[in-house]
Image: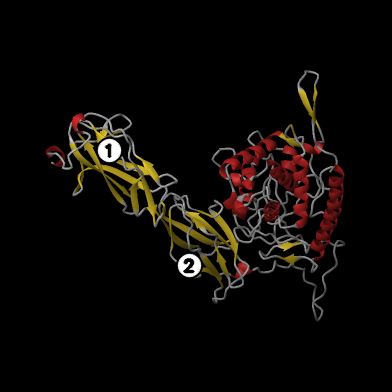
Amino acid sequence: MAAQFGRRLAKGAATTAVAALAVAALSASQAPGVTVDGHGRQTASDATPSPDATADAGSATGNSPYYTDLPPLNSPNPSPSPSASGTPVVQGSGEAGIPATVLDAYKKAETAMRAAKPGCNLPWQLLAAIGKVESGQARGGRVSADGTTLSPILGPQLDGNGFALIKDTDGGKYDGNSSYDQAVGPMQFIPSTWAWAGRDGNGDGKKDPNNVYDAALAAAHYLCRDNWDLSNQTDLNSAILSYNNSQDYLNTVLSWLEFYRKGTHSVPDGTGTVPSKRSDSGGSGNTSKPTTSKPRTHKPSTPGTSPSPSPKPGGGSPSPSTPPSPPATPTDTVDHLADAGTAKLTATAGDEFAKKISTKAVTKAGKAVAKVRVRFTIVGDTDTTFAGGESVATVVTNSSGVAVAPALQAGEKTGDLTVRATVVGRAVAALDYAATVTERVADTLVRTGDTALTCTPGGEFADQVEVKATYKSEVADKVAVTATLIKSKDDATANDKGPYFKDADGKTVRTLTGLTTDADGKLQLPKMYADDTTGTFVLRVTTAGGATLDVQLTVAAADASASPSPSPSASASS
């Protein structure tokens, strides 16, 4: 196995190095080998398209540069050895050492995802692998005690000059650049992705991409969207490619994932090993930390450093050259968003909405615009989400200019909510869609048993009432139920005598609300008691949706309990 691992890494190293050099050369020459993907991003010609084209067609990093260093060929398995004081000291590969705070952030994010999305099976080693490739584990762990980087970690500005073209989306809030976006922080999120994927991982009430706890938790949620199961290789590959849309990136991350799975150990913050080779530098090894570039400016040429500009036709003085403006993208041509035939959006609590939202990107002249990122955001006090549990999804418009949002999954909170569609990277008016979540209902309610319910005056009913609710012959779970001891079948007023329930303080109550059926549509009511009034009484059980069941109760003296009078007593019917 070790030999196979070594051969695979050696092959991967060669592939990565060649690809990195190719990308660097293409970036410098703007050769045809640099293509534009469906989102207006420049990519290497050998990049594999991300399978994640529906729920979030962007990428976490905007396909920013990353570290291409591969792990060493030796196994990182550490072995404990005693120190002079007798405390075990972990010995192992320097590359296997992960700064303590950074490692803690990864493990806490894994724990959080195990509770939030157990089916994702996210290993913290995957976060470590991405953290290594994106920022060298926050520059070797140069973070404060709360996990915030000691200085900003910024990728190059994504101005289309050798990189993707992503114009500013955050007003410079996160990257300090009000012209173009830059990847930010230890997990290298671009601002437009952080706007919806950001999380508060350290509980300080803020979502800061420069904080490794926040960034690690955000990366975990990002990798676990779309119901991916990361124990499945296909889903794992899809998740990694959605982070950065490159086959070489995928291979590099998988190499570190396998390396970290063989064993890691904690090292003090600030002492971690920092990679040196980056995908935008041809593997030259002359950078020791991620690019922290400020927005680039074009300086005028100085004599002797660049060719003189050509004279104007007819002989005039040469004019200074002006840098070419970035080409217009499809996003730049969008004038507004229009509804593309979305039907009425309504669903019962807990169910998936039968209809999906369709939005069309349109120019001022009314022409459809393809390859535009449309972001759908669920707003309002609701627990409704898109499939996969997220409240935001980004979709690229198709050749007809239409973006279809993922299916909405209704939560348990009923009422109205809004889904807002906006254009990523362009300030046009948002388009709001109204949706409604209705309560769960039942149309039939029956008792699960047929035992006669009798009690002696001042006593306790031996049996508890259990009912089962259905809707269209199917189990009706989590349906709201009300139980009331009424005066008679013709008078639904709550009785003031006869059988009763007890509340938490032991006080008499004859109406119960806030009850719900279980997963099998069943509900067992609390015990019932009788006062000194004898006769026949009625317990009425109702559900949301109108299902009703009347249950007969009898209170009689012991010597008459075997054959109770079928008629209510005078006191019971009054």
Crowd around label 2: few <14 · some 14–19 · many ≥20 (10 Å) = few
Which residue is more in the foreground, 274 or 466?
466
Please report contact status of discs 1 and 2: CB closer than 8 Å, yes or no. Answer: no
Which one is in front, 175 or 539?
Answer: 539
In the displayed image of the protein, which residue is found farthest to the top?
Answer: 85
Q: In the image, which disc is placed on residue 16?
A: none
- In the image, residue 97 sits, relative to residue 85, either above or below, namely below
Q: Is residue 368 above or below residue 5?
A: below
Q: Position of residue 451 (x, y in %)?
A: 31, 40
Q: Which residue is mark 2?
A: 342
Asked if residue 84 can be seen in this view, the reply is: yes
Pointer 1 local density, CA inside 10 Å: few below 14, some 14–19, many at least 20? some
In what quadrant of the picture does the N terminus appear? Answer: top right
| Secondary element type, mark 2 | loop
Residue position marked by numbered label 1 in the rendering: 453
Where 102 sits versus 17, above or below?
above
Q: How many marks can you see?
A: 2
Is residue 172 visible in this depiction of the protein?
no
Under mark 1, the amino acid is Leu
Percent from the top left, x then y, of residue 180? 66, 58
Identify residue type, mark 2: Thr
Type of colouring:
secondary structure
| Direction from residue 122 to residue 67 in the image, left or right | right
